[in-house]
Amino acid sequence: MTRSLPRGPVLLVALLMALSSLLLPASILAQEATPDAGASPIASPAAEEVSGAVDLDVLFIGAHPDDEASGLSTYGQWNEYDGINVGVITITRGEGGGNAVGTEEGPALGLIREREERTAVGYAGIEHIYNLDKVDFYYTVSAPLTEETWGYEDTLERVVRVVRATTPEIIITMNPAPTPGNHGHHQMAARFAVAAYDVAGDPTVFPEQIENEGLPAWAPAKIFTRPFFQNTPTGESCATEFVPTDPTEIVYGVWGGTVSEANGGQTWAAIERQGQREYASQGWASFPDISDNPDEIGCDYFLLIDSRSPFTIGNTEPTAILEGALFETTGGLAAGTVFDIETTQFGVVGDQPFEVNVSAITSGTDVSVSYELPAGWTSEVTSSSVENGTLEEVVSITPSVDAEPATRYQIIANLEVDGATGQNVEIVEVAPPVEGHLEPLPQVTQFREWVQDVNAPVLDSLIKPVVSIGVGESRDIDVTVTNNTSEPQDASVTIILQEGFTVENDTQGVALGPNETTTVTFTITNEDTSLPTANEGGVGGDYLLDIRTVGGGVATTEEAGLNLVPVVNVPGPGGGASATPAAVASPVAAGAPTVDGTISEGEYAAGPLDLSRVWEGEEPESAADASGEAWLAWDDQGIYVAVSVTDEAKGTVLPENDAKRHWRTDSVEIAIDPLGTAENTSATFKIGVFPETQEGGPAGSRDADAYQGPLAETAPGLELASSVSDPYDGYVIETFIPFDLLPAPVDPENMTMNIFIYDSDTDDLTGQTRLGWSVWGGVQGDPYRWGHVHLEGYTASGEGELEPPQMPLEAARSVDSPWSILQSAEDGVPLAGAPAVSEAEAVQVSDGPTVEGGTLTATVQAGDAGGQIHAFALDQDGNVLGDQVLTIGAGGTADINIEVGEADSVTFALSFLSEAGSVQAIADQVTP
């Protein structure tokens, strides 16, 4: 990773410099005071004195409760056998998820999910969870929408505050890249983790946290992501047998089959599963048991993003991730040693030198660094200094002239301190003289801009470029061509396609000035209209689209993909059936369909559309198990959609007041992008429809679109009918969607649409199979991969201007969570990562709390700030007995009275939220 920020606990180091001639991080000082520090986690007492009662070793940063759940077996065994203190930042409380245990939604569901998370992670010994109060607005694959909704600076400030307050040595997070189906919230959680890792040690970033709040500038030692790999080995050797596809990646495995002595000899994988079942609201209570055969248990995998501490390449022990940061290296380097290597550029060119900056902060006297380079590469140290155990070195490295373009290489630095050793690695990529790339999707462009902003280009390795095209249609694609040299270059770009697709002028020449970038455009056509569409086409749903670029005597090929999406032409009222072979059409409708839950012959102008492709979940055993078809029509008022579903097992039938979160049981989702240009579903119309409710009729709601909520509220004028067979073998849904419900006037040539079937064969509010028309993993959030719907003869009624979305922004708050309040009062980390109130602003409990006659009473005295108080009384199991919300003015008092009944023990918890947004938490134990 290319960076310029210093490493280690920067503020502490600066203070120590003033006090000592030795430049040592706090963890090294702690080790000097702890003779057996190499065998146990290293505390940072100097940081603890500044930041509060908690000092974490590892911090996981995720978006929702349960995002950390797949790593509990690792965190639990670290805690049991190595004393590692793990904490969790959860940016939202997951109020946008489903609810399999009740009808609560919004903030009420968020508080349920918070308590589930606290219980679940407790199986792994995790006691500290920090919710940042950002809204879980719905499933989206869009990081840009997530960033806009959460607010980048405010969220990053909160994450950094928690990092500085808890001083973790290691951060673990999610996948920051817009890979297909990756939740936009997960992407942004990871990006905030990477950004916090980069800036939390810089005292000029959010300086008020340091100057006014007394927090240290704290730079964690390492950061990892949790990658998803397919077909990984199982058994105790899963850590040693796994080989990453990219040989430059450093991946660690921790086996879940390790036995917990403290839990009766269960494997940690089995304990993890117990924890996961606590997420009952998400339908996880029914997760199956883990195998008791150790050979069938796999590893948790962790991918190193960056390290500021030494480690040992090839170490596969369960604690290898912790090496150098919390334990000494296998070569004997002390925990807390700072060892950093950074390049001045990520993309390097053969036979052209680039610089690497190396720094080390140690407690030793004899300090040196050596380098391991790829074959044929050379190095020359251009400057080097060692003083008081601190090394600063610049080395010039020249790749070999025949270094393979578009290939990543490791540069390994070996640190030796008084005979003890450790390593660090930097990754570079050899760039060809000229390179060509398919113009990325908007969310990919935004990701790559962020990668440059945080100087983390190594993260840009997971995204295969794709573009969609309709059956029988043509489209333009743009290729960006860059000259990476300081000399003019003549280059050519060739498009290579699979049979069934053609391109006009498949090779184009381009002249480029020094370091110039330009764009060339190609027109691609799908000529074979019989090719399978959606995820049934090509390889994994991608048809070949390779971009071959030749320039400077070097040829490179970018592997890209075409996503072939289905197309339907829908004749208008009284029109004829389409003769276009690319489209699906049926005999002309005699008039507007009747929305009555019955599909009559000739009633619909287009169809049937095949809805039987699986995109997520279990493969149906047969068409009778789960399959479906759809038909379309339109008139000058709107679109008619009919869906016939074949299903042999009925899922849970919900009451009308719970007709939401349709993916939990049998339902149909209809999604429309009226302009065909939506980057995310906030610019679309989406409804989830249940064929029946406990009251008897169909019901539904809008979800994850421009205006969510019950249909009566968000879709006035929409018509809905259904019929459910008896005996049950499926159902029919019909609906009329007025054009004026769509977020923009329809573009009849470019509108996209999708129809999905959600199939549940159980009564526990969990779905098993998802089917649809144009499908890939996560496609419900990918409007660019929906099918193309052409309304023949339709004339748009407007200019195509998009209405702004109405986003659900109400989130559960930490000041309203008694469990968050209790934790904050104990560990000193401010609620929601917000600033803590100053001493002058703090409220005081001037009288009480006491419990008499079944009532808890207390008097609160305000300081220099007014705001809101939320007081709770809890029983010994953490259940809320009662609460009270009060407003208090600056200098004023407020009386609290909460009925607690005959509880044997009462815990008092109080939050204060000042008018300026600073927070405070108070807790006390009261015996009646």
Image: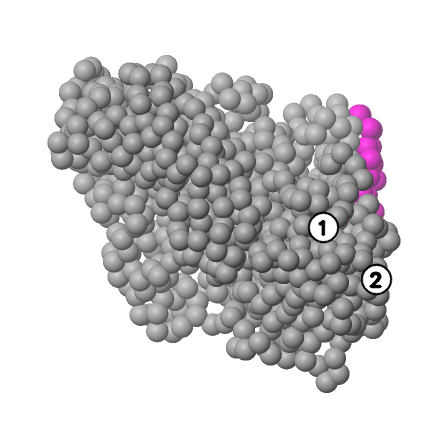
Q: Residues within 10 Å of mark 2 (few under 14, many from 20)?
A: some
Decide: is 566 above or below 32: below
Q: Quadrant of the N terminus?
A: top left
Q: Nearer the viewer, residue 502 or 624?
A: 502
Q: Secondary structure at mark 1?
A: loop
| Count of marks placed on residues | 2
Q: Is residue 800 visible?
A: yes
Q: Secondary structure at mark 2?
A: loop
Q: Residue drawn at (29%, 32%), measured in percent from left and top?
A: 550
Q: Earlier in the sequence, mark 2 or mark 1?
A: 2
Q: Mark 1 = which residue?
A: 792
Q: Nearer the viewer, residue 785 or 849?
A: 785
The stretch in magenta equals 877-897
Q: Nearer the viewer, residue 21 or 123?
A: 123
Dot 2 amino acid type: Gly
Q: Mark 2 = which residue?
A: 591
Give the main secondary structure, helix, strand or loop, of the magenta stretch: strand
Rendered location of residue 474, percent (x, y): 53, 44
Decide: is 382 above or below 237: above
Q: Residue drawn at (63%, 79%), measured in percent from left and top?
A: 648
Decide: is 777 above or below 176: below
Rendered location of residue 875, percent (x, y): 69, 57
> How was the colour assigned to the protein in this rendering?
one colour
Horizontal relation, residue 855 to residue 8: left or right: right
Q: Quadrant of the C terminus?
A: bottom right
Q: Residue drawn at (57%, 56%), measured in percent from left and top?
A: 582
Magenta span includes 887: yes
